Image (tube, rainbow, N blue to C red):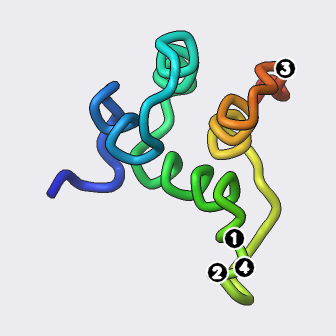
């Protein structure tokens, strides 16, 4: 198993979220998100964020960017 902090590949994305269009894969890769950040964004996208209990926090940074891509809103906040 690859470390969660390792940079994503297109295969990682498809393995995690299922088949999505190439533009979305490219946009997710462009964020520089790690596998862990993709998993966090996908949990929110899948409405599984309640499984995080008290540790749940608002989305920000690359997790928020990936989440926005997954929901089809590529107008996410600029992290700068």
Residue at image position (76%, 48%) is 60
Helix, strand, or loop for circle 4?
helix
**What percent of the width, then of the height, locates residue 49?**
69, 70
* Residue 21 versus residue 72 in the image, above or below: above
Q: Is residue 13 left or right of residue 28?
A: left
Q: Identify the secondary structure beneath mark 2.
A: helix
Asked whether the residues under the numbered discs 3 and 1 touch, taking CB atoms below 8 Å apart as contact, a structural biologist would say no
- Give the mark nearest the N terminus, 3 or 1: 1
Compute the Cα span from label 3 to label 1.
22 Å
Which residue is farthest bottom?
A: 54
Instruction: Please identify the quarter of the rendering in which residue 76 is found.
Output: top right
Residue with the mark numbered 4? 50
Task: Name the quadrant of the C terminus.
Answer: top right
Point out the residue furthest to the top here. Answer: 23
Categorize mark 2 by other alpha carbons within 10 Å: few (<14), some (14-19), many (20+). Answer: few
Report, in whole angstroms, how far the alpha carbon at label 3 lies from the one at label 4. Answer: 25 Å
Question: Which residue is under mark 1?
Answer: 49
Residue 75 marker: 3
Q: Please tell me whether mark 1 sits on a helix, a strand or a loop.
A: helix
User: How far apart, in angstroms, are the residues tagged by discs 1 and 2?
Assistant: 6 Å
Residue 68 at what x, y percent from top left? 75, 34
Kindly check if marks 1 and 4 are in contact, taking CB atoms under 8 A apart as contact.
Answer: yes
Q: Which residue is mark 2?
A: 52
- Dot 2 or dot 3, earlier in sequence: 2
């Amino acid at each position: 198993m690859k470390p969660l902090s390792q940079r994503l590949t297109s295969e990682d994305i498809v393995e995690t979220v299922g088949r999505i269009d190439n533009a979305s894969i490219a946009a997710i890769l462009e964020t520089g998100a790690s596998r862990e950040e993709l998993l966090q964004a996908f949990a929110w996208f899948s409405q599984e964020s309640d499984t995080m209990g008290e540790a749940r926090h608002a989305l920000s940074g690359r997790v928020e960017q990936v989440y926005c891509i997954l929901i089809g809103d590529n107008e996410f906040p600029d992290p700068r």
